[in-house]
Structures are given as structure tokens and as C-alpha cells.
Amino acid sequence: MGPKVDSGTYDNAIPAQADVVVIGGGIVGTSTALFLARKNISVVLCEKGHIAGEQSSRNWGWVRKQGRDSREIPLIIESMRLWTGMNELVGAETGFRTTGILYVCDTDEDAAKREAWLELVRPYQLDTRLIGSEELSSLMPGANRRFKGALYTASDGRAEPQKAAPAIAQAARRDGATILTQCAVRGVETTAGRVTRVVTEKGPITCNAVVLAGGAWSRLFCHDLGIRLPQLKVCSSVLRTEALEGGPISAARLPKVAYRKRLDGGYTIASVNANIADIVPDTFAFFRDFLPTLRMEWKSLQLRLGRRFYDEWSMAEKKPIDQISRYEQARVLDPEPEATLNDQALAAMKAVFPVFEKARVAQQWAGMIDVTPDAVPVISQVDGISDFVIATGFSGHGFGIGPGAGQLAADLVTGDPPIVDPTPFRFSRFTDGSRPRPEVAV
């Protein structure tokens, strides 16, 4: 079972019409709804399960500029600006704190990789810098060993995944958005290439535009519309501890484990090299798209063939929109965590920080990360369907970049000047010969 997210008051009555329908109640979907509502646009958000039910509540909670693909840097800069005022913007606690983030270097090769990334993003004048062993030790109190150094961004921070999206959804509702939970969208109807309405399990909504922020479900939804979205899923396991005194404050990625302190005093902990990629029918459909990524990331991936193959095979066939959809049959993706991998991560923490010998595991969970061939999201309109915007494929980077992504999606659907240049996130990069792939230096 996934982590418990903050509760909220949501709507029951489905409106007959709206200017925009947002599909998906994660950090990106709720942020899109918020910024549309603040533009005085009539917006309905439809979530098939509960707000932040999937990866938006299951991620590490990092809000970072460092280590990102350079194509994401302008958007994360804007997102960071939003995060620093988020509690005031939504009138609630999202858990955001500026605590700094460390990418710890254990070898010369590690340091060279971080130096290469730093050179790549130098035009953006970030406050990221390489620090030595002595300064690193001061940022990792209680560590029983020294490392070579680290990439450090003091202005990066953390927030609470179980609080943020629900707080943003409540703010959007106060600003006039309708927020529907347990309300799956079965399909989108078009006339002459233009969006005309969505059909939900509770009835139709006439609308002028749709934003699809469906996370790991976006590929399937696009397939129903005849859109080939190259997207796969990666399963990541996480644990959290009960409150623990005497541990480090800054979040960090060590050679074997990543951690961040939580608002409740505990720690979120995960292995950095234990993402599991289930072999599913889409693995073969998108093999060529993802081959460059697989070659680069094979050390951090574990391929697995199991029940997930048959689950996705059974969901492949589209059903008529007057019948119960697969989005109602599986409202929340809730994979089992890999306890062995979590045990290894906690053991790695204990090996560096003896205080974690006293740590008590409070909960473990797993989440499905939606990934693209270049690990860069799609935030874009789609040729052939006017006023249909996709915001998906955040590849494990979505929580921190979510508010900015939501504002960009809102700008695109309304035709307002975009918060950043949307070109790097265009959907057409998969069809225009660009051969998208991750940056080597990241």
C-alpha cells in the first residue's frame, strides 16, 4: 500500500461543460488546474483514483536543479521560484524547505562526471559547485567516513509528496476549479480535429481543450486516440523511517543510497541503482526508441519478466466509452516494494551514518515512474488534435519540476506567452528525426 496522502474536500457533482478538462490528479495535473483557475479559466480536473495516488506521493521528495538534463534547467528555475513561495500561494503546508542537495563523489570518475555536467549548465549561472572532502564532512554530520567531494547546490531543497499535490488541489478548488476524484475519463471526443468533450464514468463534459497529465497511464490513453507516445514504466522502491535525531539535514545521493530528511523527523531512503523495468508488450513496441537509453543506464536497471506483462497485455484493447474502462478497473498503480532492495539501501545508510542503527522502518512502498527515451518530459500540443496538450514522461524528475510544468501546460492550452521556451518538450521530437536521447553528462 502506498503512503497516506493528506485528505481534502473535493467535488461530487460533474459539470456539464468547462473550458478545459485536466486528466490526472498528480503534481502536474493539480498545478495545471491551479494556474488555469488563476487565469479565470473554467477547469475541471478528473482523477480516476485519489489525488497524488501514484508517483506524485511516492517519489523521494527532492526539489532540485542539479543533475538535471540541461533542457530542463529553465523550467526547474521557474519551478524553484514557485516552490519558494508555494506555502503562501496555496495557503497550506507543502513541506518545502531549502536544505541543499549533495551528489557525493567517491572516485575521480564520479568527480569528472559532475564536472562535465557543471560545464554543460554553466550558461545558466546556477549556484551549484563542486566541494571538497572537508566541506562535505560538515554537511554530512555523523558520517563515519570521508568521500572525495560532492556536487552541491545550496538553493535546492525538499518538499513532502504526500502533502504538496493535495494542497495545490485544494488551492485550485478555492480559486474556482472543480476537482473530481474517483472519476475516470474513458475517452476524448473530437470533431474535425478539435476537442469537443470528454466522457467520464460519471457522464460527459463538453469542453474546448484537454490537458493529459496521466503519468504512467498517458501512453495507454494516447494510444486510444491514435497517438504513438513512446513511454515506458520503471518501478522504484522507497522506505521511510520513524523520527530520528542526529542525522544529516541536506539531502544526498551517495554511491549506493539516497536520502532526505522528512518534515516529520524521519527519513526517506532509497537505493540509487535499483530501478526495475518490467518487460511488457510496450518494451518491444518501443525497443528502438529506448535502446540508446538502455545502453547508457543498464547498470542502474534490473529487467524483470513477470505478471506485469500479462496485466498490460490484458489492458491493451480499447473498450467502448459506454462500458467500464481499464482506468476504473485499476484505479491506482500500487506495485509491491522490493524489500531486499530497501534493506540494502538502509544497510548502506548504516554503513555511513551509525546513528541509523537506531532507525525504525515505518513504511515501504513502490511507485511506477513514467519515462521517455530522452528522460525529458513531453509538455506539448499534438498535431492532429487541436487543443489537446500532453504533460507527461517526467522520468523521475516530475515532483520538483511539477509546478513549472503545470504553469507551462496552462500557458500552452490558453495560448498565453509560455513561462519558458517549450521547444525542448515538444512532442514532435519523436517524429521529426531528432533521435532524442539523454545527455551523456547527466
Image (cartoon, rainbow, N blue to C red):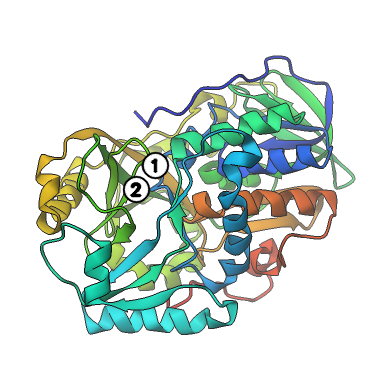
Residue 285's spot in the image, x, y percent?
50, 57
Q: Report the number of discs.
A: 2
- Residue neighbourhood size for the residue with mark 1, other residues' Cα within 10 Å, grouped as few (<14), some (14–19), many (≥20): many
Q: From the image, which quarter does the N terminus lie in?
A: top left
> Along the line of sight, which residue is nearer the eye, 24 or 404?
404
Q: Is residue 293 shown to the viewer in this render?
A: yes
Residue that badge 1 annotates? 367
Is 433 placed above or below 276 here? below
Is 311 placed above or below 419 here? above
Residue 30 falls in image quadrant: top right
Say left or right for 370 vs 20: left
Is 67 placed above or below 215 here? below
Say left or right for 10 vs 98: right
Residue 379 falls in image quadrant: bottom right
**Residue positioned 46% across, 42% down in the render:** 55
Q: What element does badge 2 sit on?
A: strand
> Along the line of sight, which residue is nearer the eye, 119 or 97?
97
- Name which residue type carries label 1: Gly
Distance between mark 1 and mark 2 Cα atoms: 6 Å
- Name which residue type carries label 2: Ser
**Residue positioned 12% across, 67% down in the render:** 145
Which numbered disc covers residue 236?
Answer: 2
- Residue neighbourhood size for the residue with mark 2, other residues' Cα within 10 Å, grouped as few (<14), some (14–19), many (≥20): many
Q: Is residue 221 shown to the viewer in this render?
A: no
Q: Are marks 1 and 2 in contact (CB under 8 Å)?
A: yes
Say left or right for 417 vs 85: right
